[in-house]
Amino acid sequence: MAPSAFLLPLLLLLLASPAGTRRPRKRPPPENPIDKIRAQENFDAAQFAGKWFLVSVAARCAHLSENSDNLEATNIVVSVPSTRALPAGLLVDTFRPLDGHCWNIKQMYFPTKTPGRFQLKAGRRKLVDVVVQTDYSSYAILYYQKDRKISAKLYGRAVRVSDAVMATFEQRVAAVGMNEDSIFYFPVYGFCDSADQFHLLDDTKYTGRM
């Protein structure tokens, strides 16, 4: 038998073996929608710190839609800690009334490589918040992502914002594919300024960087 008669089956065997098979390339993970959102240019956390009132939220959320008449006045106090226990980021105390009591939810928003973009770790979940526009003195617009869906929040240094700011917020909402029917307005009265130790939810135990 000719030598080629032996070589051909051997070549076919090598090509069919695992060693001769190329591994399929892993597909890169899909890009998160919020990764395309640009943060406030030259974001300054120190200027952002202080008290903010939640004016409105834009979201595709059945719970918000069904309970829009029962929304509670909500305000936050932002500080910028820098300790070993709480690395530099935004420490946010959220105050809101619930069942006749004032509650304080304490959360740590960890910094990322991009100023103005933060990550909130809630148990095993990682939520992303982006400060997309603020003048620090009167309003702030934030996008946040949960389950790959983007929502928006409008905060004011006062309980009400100007018509111009509201129009800017509506434009930002439209930019992420939502309309005015997706915007829910929060009360302008009934705010809490503090909460006792029995009504404190401290989520800062979820620590660590990205």
Image (cartoon, helix red, strand yellow):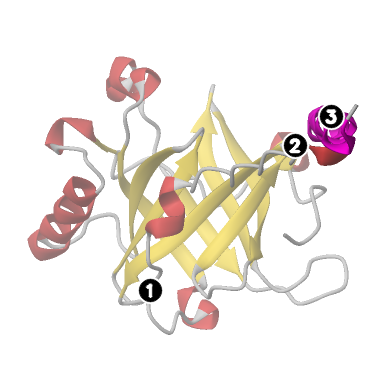
Residue drawn at (36%, 76%) of the image:
136
Dot 1 or dot 2: first in sequence order is 1
Up-down relation of residue 104 to residue 46 (above or below): above
Observer-side mark, 3 or 1, equals 3
The numbered dot on residue 40 is 1
Please tell me in which quadrant of the rendered image residue 138 appears: bottom left
Residue sitting at x 53%, y 77% = 45
Residue 188, by quadrant, is top left
Q: Are marks 1 and 2 in contact (CB under 8 Å)?
A: no
Q: Earlier in the sequence, mark 3 or mark 1?
A: 3
Q: Residues within 10 Å of mark 2 (few under 14, many from 20)?
A: few
The disc, 3 or 2, on the residue closer to the chain's N-terminal end is: 3
The amino acid on which the numbered mark 3 sits, given as a three-letter code, is Ala
Quote the CA–CA distance across marks 3 and 1. 70 Å
Q: Which residues are magenta?
A: 2-18
Q: Residues within 10 Å of mark 1 (few under 14, many from 20)?
A: many
Magenta: predominant secondary structure element?
helix
**Looking at the image, is 41 positioned above or below residue 60?**
below
Q: CA distance from mark 3 to mark 2?
A: 64 Å
Q: Nearer the viewer, mark 3 or mark 2?
A: 3
Above or below residue 99? Residue 17 is below
Residue 16 falls within the magenta-colored stretch: yes
Is residue 89 shown left or right of residue 164? right
Q: Residue 184: image x %, image y %?
A: 25, 35
- Say which residue label 3 marks: 5
Disc 2 is placed on an element classified as loop
Q: Amino acid at mark 1?
A: Gln
The residue identified by callout 2 is: 123
